[in-house]
């Protein structure tokens, strides 16, 4: 009588591997998975990660754990243009795997108007925190962006540049103009000035800034985002960012 062991081997090879304990990869993953699935619901989770091996490994593990719960996820990084992966995707939550060293996860969450989930700083429970933000909307593009700390406009050649600043029914034309804006609650604190003109400070919820005559630089937080031409509207968004430690 002929015998073979091929079939048992094949059966064993088809057995599913036991689900790996996420704590073996990184302890916060289990709680982050549960919180992300509960927050996003039927929407997609954006996982923000760095470029190091640990961050890539944790992001993949989190994506796999979410997939087992039928929750889709997309990984994004601080690389320029990475957030284009989220275009036309309904995002329900952002998970911060980068840490406190980057503002990108927080800015992305505020831009998408969803909570950012972060590992809690210690063993004790931490409460959700909110932060006021500045919304930027280009008049031509209609695209909305967000600044967490400040917005600044500077001319490459200040002597030739011109800013038109409009707020609360007032319009100011400033030669060689510059402008900075910060946020507190539902109000913007704005300072602007120019060649031969004293600095002026205003408090308003919304302000329009138009640059002309020379290239200008628009700086959002710590980064210049573009050569600035045309007009942009800045507005205050109280509690526009929600940070949820889990």
Image: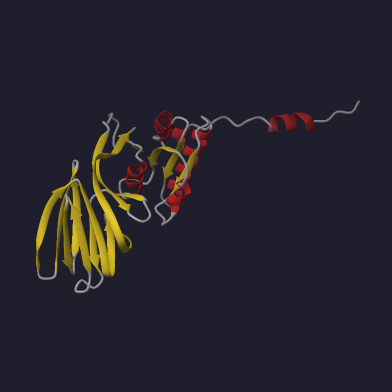
Residue at the left extreme? 198
Report the number of numbered marks.
0
Q: Is residue 225 left or right of residue 205?
A: right
Residue closest to the eye, 233 or 182: 233
Vertical position of residue 215 compared to residue 43: above or below: below
Give residue 130's quadrant in the image. top left
> At 13% from the left edge and 70% from the top edge, which residue is drawn?
195
| Residue 201 location (% of width, % of height) | 11, 55
Relative to 153, 112 lies left or right: right
Task: Please state the horizontal and vertical placement of residue 240, each as a whole percent of the image.
Answer: 27, 40
The quadrant in which the C terminus is found is top left
Quarter assignment of residue 180: bottom left
Q: Among all residues in the image, which is located at the extreme top?
A: 1
Residue at 31% of width from left, 63% of height from top?
228
Residue 139 visible in image: yes
User: Residue 4 placed where, x, y %?
Assistant: 83, 30
Q: Is residue 177 above or below residue 51?
A: below
Q: Residue at x 23, y 73 (%)?
A: 157
Between 126 and 215, the one lying in front of the other is: 215
| Residue in view at x 46 percent, y 50 percent | 53
| Front residue (pair 6, 19) | 19
- x, y percentage for residue 47? 43, 42
């Amino acid at each position: 009588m002929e015998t073979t062991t091929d079939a048992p081997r094949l059966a064993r090879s088809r057995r599913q591997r036991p689900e790996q304990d996420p704590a073996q990869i990184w302890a916060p993953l289990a709680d982050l998975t549960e919180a992300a699935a509960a927050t996003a619901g039927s929407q997609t989770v954006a996982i923000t990660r760095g470029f190091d091996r640990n961050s890539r490994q944790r992001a993949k593990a989190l994506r796999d754990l979410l997939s087992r719960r039928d929750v889709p996820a997309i990984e994004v990084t601080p690389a320029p243009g990475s957030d284009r992966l989220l275009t036309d995707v309904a995002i329900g939550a952002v998970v911060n795997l980068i840490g406190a060293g980057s503002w990108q996860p927080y800015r992305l969450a505020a831009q998408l108007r969803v909570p950012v989930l972060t590992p809690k700083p210690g063993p004790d429970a931490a409460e959700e925190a909110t932060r006021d933000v500045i919304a930027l909307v280009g008049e031509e593009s209609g695209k909305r962006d967000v600044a967490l700390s400040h917005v600044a406009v500077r001319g490459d050649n200040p002597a030739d540049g011109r800013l038109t600043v409009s707020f609360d029914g007032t319009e100011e034309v400033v030669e060689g103009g510059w402008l900075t804006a910060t946020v507190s609650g539902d109000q913007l604190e704005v300072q602007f000035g120019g060649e031969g003109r004293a600095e002026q400070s205003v408090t308003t919820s919304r302000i329009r800034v138009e640059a002309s005559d020379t290239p200008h630089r628009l700086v959002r937080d710590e980064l210049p985002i573009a050569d600035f031409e045309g007009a942009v509207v800045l507005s205050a968004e109280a509690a526009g960012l929600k940070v949820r430690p889990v």
